[in-house]
Amino acid sequence: MQLSIDLDSEVPIYQQIRDRIVEAVADGGLAEGSPLPSTRQLGADLAVNFHTVNKAYDLLRREGVIRINRKSGAVVRRDAGSGPPEPGFTEDWQPRLRTLLAEAAVQGVGADEVLRRCGEVLATFRTGEENDT
């Protein structure tokens, strides 16, 4: 698994790690059952503190994206589009979506362009609905 993070970004490193893993699951780069590096190994690979990686993994665990087992370590819990969302996901996700859309609106991005770009991005993910976009 190849992750890239921007150490100069305003986005916290743990959030970047979380986001890159979610994207890898969504685009099929990480399938259900795929192992993730240990927190220490990924921390060393990215030159960040392993506690930062642990924070990202814990967030992913709480979101239902990975499971963590003392024996097998962290593994991907589900494939993209492999069933209904986790309970409460949609309610938690909508406020984040609202903020992202608000950012686009403030910058003057029109609704047609937002929808076009959403379609382009969704087409890169393995949602089980590849032919619907």
Image (cartoon, rainbow, N blue to C red):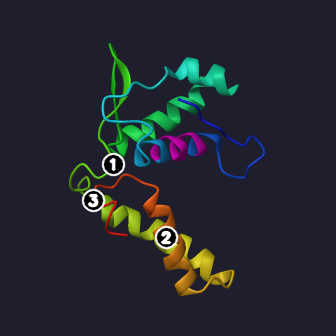
Mark carried by residue 80: 1
Q: Label 2: which residue?
A: 118
Say which residue appears at 51% left-offset and 29% top-offset.
54
- Distance from disc 1 to disc 3, alpha carbons, whole Å, reads 17 Å
Q: Is residue 130 visible?
A: yes
Q: Quadrant of the C terminus?
A: bottom left
In the rendering, at what x and y percent does residue 19 appear?
Answer: 53, 47
Q: Is residue 85 above or below residue 115?
A: above
**Amino acid on which the number 1 mark rests in the picture:** Ala
Local secondary structure at mark 3: loop
**Dot 2: within a 10 Å radius of its alpha carbon, few (fewer than 14), some, or many (20 or more) residues?**
few
Count of picture labels: 3
Find the magenta span and give its range: 16-22
Of 11 and 6, the residue lying toward us? 6
Residue 48 visible in this rendered orientation of the protein: no
Q: Which one is closest to the eye, mark 1 or mark 3?
A: 1
- Amino acid type of the residue tagged 3 in the rendering: Gly
Q: Splitting the image into 4 quarters, where does residue 117 fall?
A: bottom right
Q: CA distance from mark 2 to mark 3?
A: 22 Å
Q: Residue at x 65, y 19 (%)?
A: 44
Q: Residue at x 41, y 49 (%)?
A: 26
Magenta: main secondary structure equals helix
Q: Which residue is mark 3?
A: 88
Q: Residue at x 33, y 48 (%)?
A: 80
Residue 79 is drawn in which quadrant?
A: top left
Q: Which one is in front, 71 or 120?
A: 120
